[in-house]
Image (tube, grey):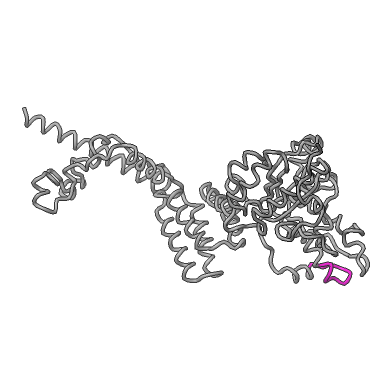
Amino acid sequence: MAETPPENSSDLFEPAPDAGREAAQPVNPPLADRMRPRSLEEFVGQEHILGPDMPLRRLIEEGRIPSMILWGPPGSGKTSLGRLMAEYVGAAFESFSAVLAGVKDVRKVVERARRRQWVEGGPTFLFVDEIHRFNKAQQDAFLPHVEEGLIVLIGSTTENPSFEVNAPLLSRTTVFQLQPLDEEALGVILRRALEDSERGVAGRDGGPLVIGDDVADLLVGLADGDARVLLSLLEMAEAAAEGEITTGLVSDLLQRKTLRHDRTGESHYNLISALHKAVRGSDVDGALYWLARILEGGEDPLFVARRVVRMAAEDVGLADPRALNVALAARDIYHFLGTPEGEIALFEAVAYLALAPKSNAVYTAEKESRRAASENPSYPVPLHIRNAPTRLMKDLGYGAGYRYDHDYDDKLAPQGYLPEELADLRFYHPTDQGLEAKLRERLDWLRGRRAELMEEESKGQEEEEQ
């Protein structure tokens, strides 16, 4: 008995509904779309995964392309790579954006893939742009079809998949990280677009396009690693130019370079991490550069101010207590002056913190004291340092035997302040940096002197008892 084809097999090759599927190619597609590479040999960049004998290149050449997540910044070639892989193995290519699509659209793609498999026996590559925008339930919808091998899922994301893709789906895919394109790669892409008369701008109606090396360097710099931005800038400049693209024309078209920075994504945390670590490492130039990158990228300066206060407490500490005051003053100054005038205070604070002596002794003491508090029993407060506001409390011994330190020489009474069970613990260990070197001397003396007084007190009590 012949196998019955899936229902509605007649519409196998009909256009998919608009929602969730890639729109039909426009009559005059943008330059960035026209210049997509048509072969792996045309693909520029990502040699760490696509170079000779590199892992993804081998998988493609052997026709063993797995479901994968392509993780990288905008314009690094994720969509182009997905298309090329499908073409290389002769697979159908379905594409939609997670911003516009939902589970219903996934089901429709799966239905088409199943019908296609029945008719042709070939695989379907499903490219999901911005897969991190799907919630857990939506991502789970792919699982059975990936496991079955019905679809090869190519998820594209600009965000760290360890945080944005749920664990079951992540375990069934291979993650390949794409890097921002360097200036050499962008230069190759720019030259191709300028020289290609079929897809590029060489065949423009207005005649040959003149562009100097200085303008080419400017366009590459403005693209900031993003091929799509580079080609969009070229297209805008070409449309506005009268035969020659000048630096003035480019500047007029794009008043300000847009730096790669996502206030809620991974670059947000990477840039803040770079700033914090440069301050900790006493590299004032690095710290100022990362601060500039963060602010130029549009980060909220008050968020930066809060991080700077944290740096002062965590990494400078008591080596220079003034650092915390400088950080707090910078926050208040920015709050008072706003952007851009108040941002100079943030640069001043970051420079001060980078140059200040460093100590994380208080930070370490905080962690050690918290650990002691959480890992030990809730020992009672020693009676002599308890508060005794009522007669009953006094009758129960609260405050009994407490010595008022100001009444003693050196302002030290022969008594301890930790529970007896923890009396030997030490949490704060000052460094030899800045003011903390003097504090260390003071602390060593205080600890030694108190030990002497308590020993003398103990001997006196033994002699009285005898």
Q: Is 221 located above or below residue 421 in the figure? A: below
Horizontally, residue 454 falls left or right of residue 320, namely left
Q: Residue at x 85, y 62 (%)?
A: 212
Q: Is 144 located above or below residue 316 in the figure? A: above
Q: Residue at x 9, y 49 (%)?
A: 392
| Quadrant in which the N terminus is drawn | top right
Instruction: Provide the residue span drawn in magenta.
Output: 237-247
Percent position of residue 308, x then y: 48, 56
Q: Nearer the viewer, residue 256 or 318?
A: 256
Q: Is 306 located above or below residue 454 in the figure? A: below
Q: Is 37 located above or below residue 347 in the figure? A: above
Q: How many marks?
A: 0
Q: Is residue 182 visible?
A: no
Q: Residue at x 65, y 58 (%)?
A: 99
Percent position of residue 257, x then y: 69, 63
Percent position of residue 258, x then y: 67, 62
Q: Residue at x 83, y 45 (%)?
A: 87
Horizontally, residue 8 falls left or right of residue 321, namely right
Horizontally, residue 268 falls left or right of residue 89, namely left
